């Protein structure tokens, strides 16, 4: 789920500093109280069941900060009792060590994007992405192993593709790669998840490399997407912001970055909701680099296409051409 944690905390007049470790933040409240937290991946609704799954290290000064669009009454009761720390955006408030912090003004919060209910079709979208990335036909068993789904699901998805794909003795072959890419892009909602904004002064490519190296040291499995990935795959766009997928929060304060709202950030780290982000990086005849690991070309295409720069559309078209040419017989 997409929640801008930094912006919410700043709206509550909190400052954010580097914590005791690379995975912790030191929060300072408006009256200068200090709280050491590690931010948990954001969810739509914080529940007691979620709390039970969060590892809590007894005796550690760093407390998990649970983040959600909303929270259940039982969770709020536990937070007010000082048992857990919670940040919600509807209504905007953070409860730390039993202290409740809300905005000073009572003006209503701006309308937010309506949440999609139900389970998202990550497996279905990843199967289509896998077929887009493959440079040769793939058997259903291979697709299932890469994506992490059943062969029955692969069979259903391929059947639903109709005339866009065909089954041969060599595997599933895409007949209309351009139409399949357009179909996937229209339906895919993006990787989602929790995003952290960072601001740096170095050129964007240099910032991204520095952040990638730091995330690797922290074993956060970084994958570079967006502008910088597009620049590596099909040089066309001048990178204006870095985007790195990671599997856990990373603290970049020690390598020249400061936390920033997403709309002001020069680099964004994202803990994606989509569990398949890491599964398809080895598919297809795309460049491999020794100094950096890229998200797969389809994800990079989606991220660039949904950017807001004047050249985002043209850069996405270049990536689309790379993907569909790779698929051509």
Image: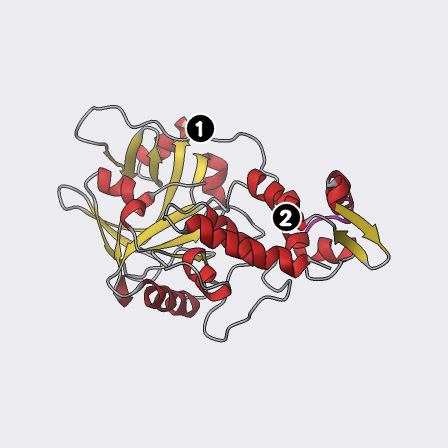
Looking at this rendering, what residue extends furthest in the bottom direction?
Answer: 290
Taking 234 as reference, is 3 left or right? left
Question: Number of marks in the image?
Answer: 2
Instruction: Check disc 2 and report its element: helix, strand or loop.
Output: helix
Q: Earlier in the sequence, mark 2 or mark 1?
A: 1
Taking 175 as reference, is 97 left or right? left
The answer, for residue 100, to whether it is visible in the render is yes
Q: Is residue 275 above or below residue 31?
A: below
Does the magenta-highlighted stretch encompass residue 150?
yes
Mark 1 lies on residue: 114
Instruction: Check disc 1 and report its element: helix, strand or loop.
Output: loop
Does the magenta-highlighted stretch encompass residue 210?
no
- Quarter of the N terminus within the rendering: top left
Point 40% across, 51% down: residue: 311
Label ID, residue 48: none
Of residue 196 and residue 179, the one placed in the foreground of this image is: 179
Of residue 216 and residue 267, the one placed in the foreground of this image is: 267
Mark 2 lies on residue: 178
Q: Magenta span covers which residues?
A: 148-153
The answer, for residue 39, to whether it is visible in the render is no
On the image, which quarter does residue 210 sit in?
bottom left
Q: Position of residue 86 (x, y in %)?
A: 34, 39
Q: Give the CA separation, mark 2 to mark 1.
A: 30 Å
Point 86% across, 57% down: residue: 169
Badge 1: how crowded within 10 Å, few (<14), some, or many (20+)?
few
């Amino acid at each position: 789920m997409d929640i801008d944690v930094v912006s919410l905390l700043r709206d509550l007049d909190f400052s954010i500093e580097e914590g005791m470790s690379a995975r912790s933040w030191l929060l300072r409240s408006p009256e200068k109280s200090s709280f050491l937290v590690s931010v948990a991946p954001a969810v739509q609704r914080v529940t007691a069941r979620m709390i039970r799954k969060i590892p809590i290290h007894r005796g550690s000064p760093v407390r998990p900060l649970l983040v959600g669009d909303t929270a259940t009454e039982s969770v709020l009761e536990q937070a007010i009792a000082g048992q857990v720390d919670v940040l919600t955006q509807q209504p905007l408030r953070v409860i730390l060590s039993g202290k409740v912090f809300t905005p000073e003004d009572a003006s209503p919060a701006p309308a937010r994007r309506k949440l999609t209910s139900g389970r998202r079709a990550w497996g279905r979208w990843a199967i289509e992405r896998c077929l887009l990335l493959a440079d040769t036909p793939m058997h259903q068993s291979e697709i299932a192993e890469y994506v992490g789904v059943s062969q029955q699901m692969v069979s259903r998805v391929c059947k639903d593709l109709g005339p866009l794909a065909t089954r041969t003795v060599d595997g599933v072959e895409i007949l209309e790669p351009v139409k399949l890419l357009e179909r996937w892009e229209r339906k895919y909602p993006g990787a989602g998840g929790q995003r952290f904004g960072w601001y740096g002064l170095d050129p964007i490519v240099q910032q991204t490399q520095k952040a990638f190296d730091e995330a690797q040291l922290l074993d956060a499995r970084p994958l570079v997407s967006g502008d910088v990935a597009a620049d590596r795959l099909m040089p066309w766009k001048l990178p204006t912001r870095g985007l790195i997928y990671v599997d856990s929060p990373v603290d970049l304060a020690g390598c020249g970055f400061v936390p920033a709202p997403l709309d002001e950030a020069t680099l964004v780290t994202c803990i994606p909701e989509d569990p398949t982000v890491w599964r398809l990086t080895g598919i297809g005849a795309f460049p491999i680099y020794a100094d950096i690991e890229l998200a797969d070309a389809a994800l990079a295409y989606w991220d660039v296409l949904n950017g807001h720069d004047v050249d985002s559309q043209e850069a996405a078209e270049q990536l689309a051409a790379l993907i569909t040419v790779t698929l051509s017989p």
